[in-house]
């Protein structure tokens, strides 16, 4: 599903590579934690998958398509197959919960009757039924992240990229969000999650890819965060 081959990324303004000859594969339906200290290249990796950046060297295949070589006009279609969730939720503050999720479908031209049907379904899936008319500032952090996950998932993407999704949440709320990401993963969606959260990684025992100075230094099938991090 994702194949990274000898990928090096050197940003224009930097001499040290953010990713240095990285190779690994992710199968459809996997749940993968990408861990490593600040600056080790986690976000760069996620940005390359989204074609927000292109590699300096190497190849990035998603479903056998070389993302780096993809013509610019095809990039929006690629991004429709990838849902994204961030630490800071990134909701539209002047739109309701329903409208935030609906917006993701409107921008890709889905008809109103589909939106009316699908949005309540996904809000129920994330545990927000009954809250569709709230504004983001009337929700807890955990609820806001649920909206963000609903918005990322409503179009049934092939994969979900989560960059520190629990970074602003307390431990209990973080566990709830992880249960939700697990549920989404069980629908067959590949989940890649960059995190610094030791306890979550240790409790989930999923695949762990660890980066350090832009290199993969560990790839464990049922990993823990690791000693000394
Ligand atoms: N746009 C950019 N221009 C220049 N250098 C960058 C850019 N983005 C990231 N870098 C550098 O690339 C390296 C990897 O950064 P990256 O953001 O991928 O790390 P990270 O593991 O996601 O860190 P964090 O956990 O703090 O989010 C760092 O040295 C960083 O300074």
Image (cartoon, grey):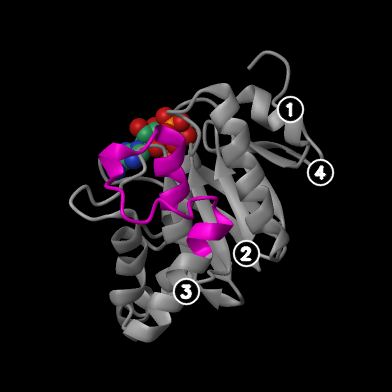
Q: Which residue is mark 2?
A: 2
Measure the alpha-carbon separation of dots 2 and 4. Answer: 16 Å
Marks 3 and 4 sit apart, C-alpha to C-alpha, by 35 Å
- Relative image position of residue 177 (x, y in whole percent): 57, 40
- Up/down of 172 relative to 77, above or below: above
- Residue extending farthest to the front is 130
Residue 57 appearing in the image: no
Closer to the chain start, of discs 3 and 4, is 3
Which residue is depicted at the point 47% across and 57% down? 150
- Indicate which quadrant contains ligand 1: top left
Asked if the residue at tag 1 contacts the one at tag 4, i.e. Cβ–Cβ closer than 8 Å, the answer is no
Q: Which residue range is magenta in the image? A: 122-148
> Disc 3 marks which residue?
118
**Quarter of the figure with the C terminus:** top right
Residue located beneath label 4 in the image: 221
What element does badge 4 sit on? loop
- Secondary structure at numbered mark 3: helix
Q: CA distance from mark 2 to mark 1?
A: 24 Å
Identify the mark nearer the N-term, 1 or 3.
Answer: 3
> Percent from the top left, x then y, of residue 59?
54, 65
Q: Residue at x 61, y 48 (%)?
A: 180
Pointer 4 local density, CA inside 10 Å: few below 14, some 14–19, many at least 20? few
């Amino acid at each position: 599903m994702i194949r990274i081959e000898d990928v090096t990324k050197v940003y224009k303004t930097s001499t040290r590579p953010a990713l240095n000859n990285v190779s690994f594969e992710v199968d459809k339906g996997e749940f993968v934690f990408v861990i490593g200290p600040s600056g080790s290249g986690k976000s760069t990796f996620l940005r390359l998958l989204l074609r927000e950046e292109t590699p300096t060297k190497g190849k990035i295949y998603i479903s056998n398509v070389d993302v780096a070589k993809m013509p610019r006009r095809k990039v929006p279609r690629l991004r429709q197959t990838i849902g994204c969730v961030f630490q800071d939720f990134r909701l539209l503050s002047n739109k309701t919960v329903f409208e935030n999720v609906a917006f993701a479908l409107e921008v890709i031209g889905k008809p109103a009757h589909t939106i009316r049907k699908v949005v309540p379904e996904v809000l129920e899936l994330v545990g927000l039924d009954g809250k569709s008319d709230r504004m983001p500032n009337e929700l807890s952090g955990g609820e806001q992240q649920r909206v963000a996950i609903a918005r990322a998932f409503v179009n049934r993407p092939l994969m979900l990229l989560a960059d520190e999704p629990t970074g602003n949440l307390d431990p209990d709320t973080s566990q709830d969000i992880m249960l939700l990401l697990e549920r989404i993963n069980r629908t067959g969606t590949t989940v890649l999650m960059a995190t610094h959260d030791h306890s979550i990684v240790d409790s989930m025992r999923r695949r762990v890819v660890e980066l350090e100075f832009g290199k993969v230094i560990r790839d464990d099938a049922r990993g823990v965060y690791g000693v000394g991090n």
